[in-house]
């Protein structure tokens, strides 16, 4: 992700505010004046909305508009989206060599470690008896240890769609139980940034 570009969801929120003739904050206005890509997207949305307004059958889904409006009412979430980073995989237990003589087969768990500029995230994928998977982990600030911010949130997503959310424990821990096995992702919202983590399947 280019850090100088507004996330497309945040851009939708800016467009909704402009449509309602509300004043954009100085940072957003300055960005739109200097970034031809975001300015072009915003202009395209305005044209598309103008065409849609003349079509009686056109109406954005209420759930989508509510999400956009909610972002507009939550400046901190907009800042998190603008400062989104993708964490890098630094450890994978599947990449470790098995001891000589060990039989290969489906592992019951998989340990992963991801790193972003200021954050380290440990993730454990564990297979359950009912063929589902539990996804648990711990979020650490590299300087101060477990993140204890009560407003921090971890979302489990697939293809960008939200599945479930978890808050962090006093030790920076989170857990999702009875998750169908498959490739998922985590979105961790911390103070003024969002850390995105692509998760592999436990069988990969």
Image: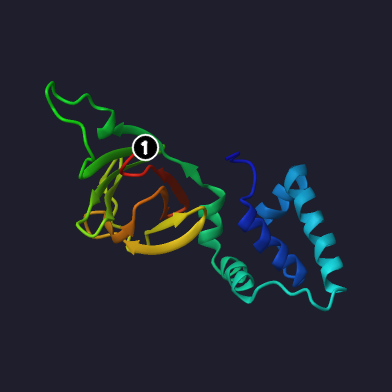
> Is 79 rendered above or below residue 72?
above
What x and y, as percent, mark residue 17? 70, 67
What x and y, as percent, mark residue 197? 42, 45
Q: Front-most of 50 and 139?
A: 50
Quadrant (top left, top right, bottom left, bottom right) of the N terminus: top right
What x and y, as percent, mark residue 27? 65, 52
What residue would you read off at disc 1?
Answer: 115
Q: Where is residue 58, by image quadrant?
A: bottom right
Determine the residue positioned at 22% across, 40% down.
107
Determine the residue positioned at 44% across, 56% down.
157
Determine the residue positioned at 51% across, 52% down.
159
Q: Image check: 22 left or right of 150?
A: right
Q: Image check: 76 left or right of 39?
A: left
Q: Image check: 128 left or right of 83?
A: left
Quadrant (top left, top right, bottom left, bottom right) of the C terminus: top left
Q: Secondary structure at mark 1?
A: strand
Q: Front-most of 145 and 84?
A: 84
Determine the residue positioned at 21% across, 36% down.
105
> Is 67 rendered above or below residue 99?
below
């Amino acid at each position: 992700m280019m850090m100088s570009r507004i996330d497309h969801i945040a851009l939708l929120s800016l467009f909704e505010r402009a449509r309602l003739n509300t004043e954009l904050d100085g940072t957003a206005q300055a960005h739109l004046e200097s970034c031809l890509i975001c300015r072009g997207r915003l202009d395209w949305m305005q044209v598309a909305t103008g065409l849609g307004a003349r079509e009686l059958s056109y109406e954005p889904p209420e759930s989508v508009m509510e999400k956009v409006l909610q972002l507009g009412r939550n400046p901190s979430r907009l800042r998190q989206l603008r400062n989104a980073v993708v964490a890098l995989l630094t450890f994978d237990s599947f990449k470790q060599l098995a001891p000589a003589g060990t039989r290969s087969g489906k592992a019951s768990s998989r340990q992963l470690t991801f790193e972003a500029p200021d954050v380290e995230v440990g993730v454990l994928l564990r297979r359950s008896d009912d063929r589902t998977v539990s996804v648990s982990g711990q979020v650490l600030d590299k300087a101060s240890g477990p993140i204890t911010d009560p407003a921090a949130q971890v979302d489990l997503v697939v293809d960008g769609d939200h599945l479930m959310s978890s808050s962090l424990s006093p030790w920076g821990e989170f857990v999702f139980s009875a998750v169908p096995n498959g490739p998922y992702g985590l979105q961790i919202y911390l103070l003024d940034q969002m850390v995105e983590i692509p998760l592999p399947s436990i069988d990969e």
